[in-house]
Amino acid sequence: MRQLLASGYKAADIEAAMIAAGYSGAEVQQGWKSLEVVISQEQGQLYFNLSDQGRDQATQPQPKENYLASPVFWSVLVGFVVLSLGIWVLLFVVGSSLTNSPPFFLGAFVVLQIAAFFTWLAMRNRNPALARGLAVGLLIIDVIIPATLLVNLLVFFGLCLAGLVGLP
C-alpha cells in the first residue's frame, strides 16, 4: 500500500483494488493502520493519520498560475506579434523600392519564427509566462492569420464565381 501511495495512486483506488483482490474491509483498514505505524516510526518523518485527513490528502492539486495577469506574457505576446507583422510591413514598404530587400526580410521573418519556437522549447519550464506568450504569438502569426486569409480568399473567389455563373 505504501509503495502504491508513493507511486501516486489514490487511496480510494488502492482500497478498491484490494477489495476486488479478495481482501475484506477489515483487512484493508488494518493495512491502513499498519501503514500509519510504519510511517510514524521512520526517522525524520512526522506522524500523520491517513484516515483522519481523508484518503486523497497526498494528491492535492497545486494552484495554477494565471498567465493572463502576467505582464511578461502580454509584453512578449504584443512584442512578438508587432515585430512579426512589422517585418511584413517592411517587406512591402521598403522591399518595393529595393531590389535585394525581399529575400532579406523574408529570411528575417523565418529566422524570427524559428528562434521563437526554440526559445519556447527552452523556456516552457523555466519561465512559463514567457513561453506561453511566445506560443500564443506563434499560433496567431503562423496559424490563425494565414487560415483567416485563406478562408477569406476562398469566400471571395466563391462569390466571384457565383457572380460569373449567374447564381442568385
Image (tube, helix red, strand yellow):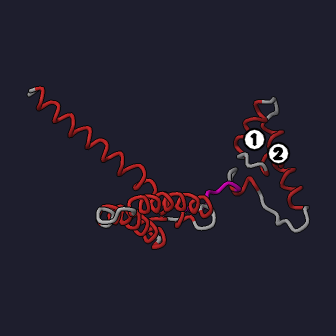
Tag 2 residue: 1
Report which quarter residue 165 is drawn in.
Answer: top left
Most extreme residue toward the front is 99
Rendering coords of residue 126 (x, y %): 63, 66
Is label 2 in contact with label 1 (beta carbons under 8 Å)? yes
Q: Is residue 59 magenta?
A: yes
Measure the C-alpha gap from mark 2 to mark 1: 7 Å
Looking at the rendered structure, the kind of residue marked 1 is Ile
Judging depth in this view, the residue of 20 and 9 nearest the camera is: 9
Check the picture and name the quadrant holding the C terminus.
top left
Judging depth in this view, the residue of 8 and 55 nearest the camera is: 8
Q: Main secondary structure of the magenta part?
A: loop
Judging depth in this view, the residue of 133 and 107 nearest the camera is: 107
Looking at the rendered structure, the kind of residue marked 2 is Met
Q: Which residues are magenta?
A: 58-64
- Where disc 2 sits, the SS reads loop
Check the picture and name the quadrant holding the N terminus.
top right
Rendering coords of residue 6 (x, y %): 79, 51
- Where disc 1 sits, the SS reads helix
Tag 1 residue: 14
- Give the numbered dot on residue 163: none
Taking 91 as reference, is 32 above or below it? above
Report the residue at 51% width, 60% height from top: 111
Report the residue at 37% width, 50% height from top: 144
Report which quarter residue 125 is drawn in.
Answer: bottom right
Rendering coords of residue 137 (x, y %): 44, 59
**Crowding at mark 1 (Cα within 10 Å: few <14, some 14-19, many 20+):** some
